[in-house]
Every structure is written in structure tokens, then in C-alpha cells.
Image (cartoon, coloured by chain):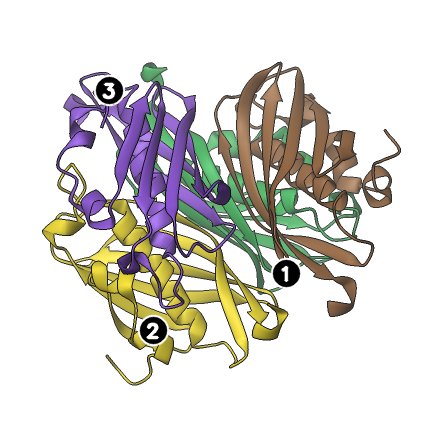
Chain colours: A yellow, B purple, C brown, D green
Amino acid sequence: MPKDVPTDMSGFNPFGDLIGLQFIKCEGGQSRCTVEVQPGLLNPHGVVHGGVLYSMADTGMGGAMYTVMEKDELCATIEIKIVYFKAVRSGTLVCDTRIISRGKRVAALESEITNDGRLVAKASGTYSVFRAKEG
Amino acid sequence: MPKDVPTDMSGFNPFGDLIGLQFIKCEGGQSRCTVEVQPGLLNPHGVVHGGVLYSMADTGMGGAMYTVMEKDELCATIEIKIVYFKAVRSGTLVCDTRIISRGKRVAALESEITNDGRLVAKASGTYSVFRAKEG
Amino acid sequence: MPKDVPTDMSGFNPFGDLIGLQFIKCEGGQSRCTVEVQPGLLNPHGVVHGGVLYSMADTGMGGAMYTVMEKDELCATIEIKIVYFKAVRSGTLVCDTRIISRGKRVAALESEITNDGRLVAKASGTYSVFRAKEG
Amino acid sequence: MPKDVPTDMSGFNPFGDLIGLQFIKCEGGQSRCTVEVQPGLLNPHGVVHGGVLYSMADTGMGGAMYTVMEKDELCATIEIKIVYFKAVRSGTLVCDTRIISRGKRVAALESEITNDGRLVAKASGTYSVFRAKEG
């Protein structure tokens, strides 16, 4: 994992590890993470569970946020909507995330998830940003 | 698991097994599923990853859909939006899902996720319903 | 209009007036507003434009928010998702809104829009709440 | 209005007329429409009502859909989520819409709304596509 991944994204991430999520890039308000399709990630129909693609977007958005936050800032997911375009059965999933708006209290992000170059899902989310001392 | 859970929800569900998801109920356009918080489901901040709560909603919506579909019908998630209210660190997560509208081609569902009785997240999703022969 | 409607909801509301929106109730984190279907609210297919139903939800959420905010607080819509169930051609539209979660910085609300008793659309939104002095 | 705007977008559109919406372009799965800010479009706080921006997105998505549908096809909005970035008080609003996925039964679209070049809101929606004979 590259050096530009922030500390809290590079180490202990139990659920990320459970689904095999790896950060490739995390800088300048953007991130890229990947998941290799494994049998354990499938739903009853033999396709990758929608929750896997969603988890890539949610994690990727958190990773992108940490590249633009100050040391005493924290963030929390307000909401995310994900739309599915194609079923995925094998190969590598790549999730590219970018911040599309950074307000004082709220940031908006988008994630595009591709499978072997095909767009398979897209997510749109908002995060609350606040000072740690604000509790 | 009760007998009224449809075959394809009761057996082989690799990703559901990975996160410890269990169906408690699946009938009449409703479902209830649970997940016990385990260390492997946490994010870098020590709280349950948003993707776990999302996966409960997505799986619970699929379970509710199968109780109202005819034998030659299939369904697919179009999109789901989830809003988070509180961080979860331990205990049991319960996801209650119900169909709020069943049109000819599209159904709308809602899931409420509680942790020890507190509402911690709510999801709103739509599913496409179609005949298997339509491909 | 009842006395418990806050000042800024009861008077000058140009767009509300343009679509004929009227508040029936605004109290305790809830609101009800109505719109009578008029020819000017139709889309090219002769059904009420989706933007009318959306505007009822957005306005109704603002009205519900003002019943729970303190004097020096302001709020702003972060995002709203609306799902449509049935086309509306005539009659009265009623939009019932309630706050489902009130956090320190973010509140979540839901609006159900009915037409002669039938649920025709449902919206889920989030609002940012902040002190006026915070700018 | 250019010739490539489909018949049912170029003529009778009462609600579009009410808010002053004009189509600039409608072709190849894309559309552009505009609204001039008028006093009648403001909310109680003197900023353009969120429902106006939403209505531009919903109408623009319909316009983009009609450029890719066959003669016996119809479409209906399933759901739209809109996120707001900045308040708008004057000037021209421009809404650029494009189809990001066109499946057999469902299409996904995005609209970006700008005000004097600044991105002020973004919407993500899904439409159901079906044959007229399917009712």
C-alpha cells in the first residue's frame, strides 16, 4: 500500500480485511480501492452481493475524505445511495471515488465501481465533517 | 429458521454467512434478519462498518421480495439509499424490512435497523421485478 | 393556518404560492401540507409533475424542522430522495412529514404523499442544522 | 427550441412553463435545460426553492430519455435523489443531464445544475422503460 494512504486507512480495518478490500490510492480528495471476487462474496444467485460493492464505496469515500481533512477534524457517513447496473460474477472490482463538493459541514462524494472496465455500480454519498472537540 | 423462508434464502448464501446474517422471518412481504456484532465487522474506528448495516438491508429486502413473487418471477436491486443515525459498537443488529409499494415492474421497500431497540439506520430501496423468460 | 406555524413558514413563500401549497399543520417535529391539482401543475403526459410532489416534501420537511429548532439555529437541505408509486391526475395531494432522527448536526425526515388516500410517493431527506453565528 | 427536441417535450408542458423551464438541447441521451431566477421561484429565505432545481433535473432526465427510446416505448421516473451544494439567489440555472446506464428495463441518469458556472446541485435518478402495450 502506498505511503500516501493515511494511517487510519492503512492498518487495522477488520471489515475491509474480511472482504479483501485493498487501497491502491488515497490522495487529493480521491481514492481507489479493489476487491478480488471470491466465493465468499457471492449472494444466493452466484453473483457478488450488493453489500460488497456498497462497502467498497463507503470505505473508498472515507479514504477520500481523510485526504482533505485537518488533524482535528472527524467525519461520519450521513447517507449513501448506490445504483446497480450489471451483475458481477468474477474478476476484480475497482472502486474510484472523488469528492464533488466540500462545504463547511457537509461533503458530497461519488464512487464508480468497475469490473474489468465495465461500470457496474455508482454511489453518491454525503459526509458530515466536524471538529473532534465538538464531540 | 422457520419453514416459510424461501429455499434460496435458507441455504447457500456465502456473503450472508461471512457476516453472520440470519433470517428470523420471511413472510407476507416482510422479513427480519439479525447480525451479532463481531470484531471482524468493525471499521478502523471500532464501530460496525456501514457496509454491514447496508448488507442487512439489501439481503432483508431480497428476502421480503421472494415472499410475494410468483414462481417464474425474478427480481434485482435497482438502488438502495441508507441513512445512518448512530454508531454501533456491540450487541445484536436487527433489520426489519417491509414492502411499501408493489407495482407491476418495480417494488419499493424499507428497512429499519435497530441495535438493542435503538433505530441506528434506515434504508429505502427499489427492486425491478420481471419474468424469468424475459431474460 | 394555525398559530403554531413558524413565522417564516406562514407568510412570504413565493414558490409555495406558485404551486398552491398550504400548510395545514406544523408542530412537534411534524407537518402536513396540501396542494390542489391544477392544470398548471401537469407534465406533458397530463399527470402532476414529479417536481410538485417533490416540492411538497422539501417544503414540508422544512416546516417540520422549524418546529424543533432553537431560535439561533438554521437548517439547510442536504439531500432528498423521492420514490414515485402512482401517477396523479386530479384531486388533492396531502404531504405528511415527520422527523425520524434528530442528531446534533444532522436530522433525517420522511414525507408520505397521498392522493385521495392512496400513497403516491415517499421521500427521505436529511437536513444540516447549525447555529446562525456559525455562518 | 431546436428541431431535435422530441414533440412531447417541445410543446404543452404546463409545469415547465410555470417555472420558466426551457430546453436548449435534447439529443443522444443528453439534455440541457435552463431556468432564469425569478422572484416567484424563491423560498421564504430568499433563495431559489429546492423544488425548482429538482424539477429541472426531473424534466431534463425525461428529455434525455426520450432521445433514446423507441416509438412504442414509454418511461416513468422510479426515484431521484438530489444533493444541494450552494444556495442560489439570482442569475441563470443550467441543468445538464446524461444517461449513465441504459438497461433493458431500467435506465440511470445524472443531472448537474450550475449557476453562473458553479455546481450548485447534482441529481441521480432511475427510470423504468416499458412497451406501451404492456400497459
Type of amino acid under label 2? Met
Q: CA distance from mark 3 to mark 1?
A: 50 Å
Q: CA distance from mark 2 to mark 1?
A: 30 Å
Question: Label 1, on which residue?
Answer: D86
Nearest the eye: D32 or D112: D112
Which element type, helix, strand or loop, lies under badge 3?
loop
Q: Residue at x 38, y 38 (%)?
A: B95
Query: Label 3: chain?
Result: B
Q: Residue at x 19, y 41 (%)?
A: A43
Type of amino acid under label 3? Asp
The quarter of the picture where residue A94 lies is bottom left
Q: CA distance from mark 3 to mark 2?
A: 42 Å
Type of amino acid under label 1? Lys
Horizontal and vertical percent for residue A25? 29, 75
| Residue B4: image tag | 3
Residue extending furthest toward the right = C3
Horizontal and vertical percent for residue C135? 74, 68
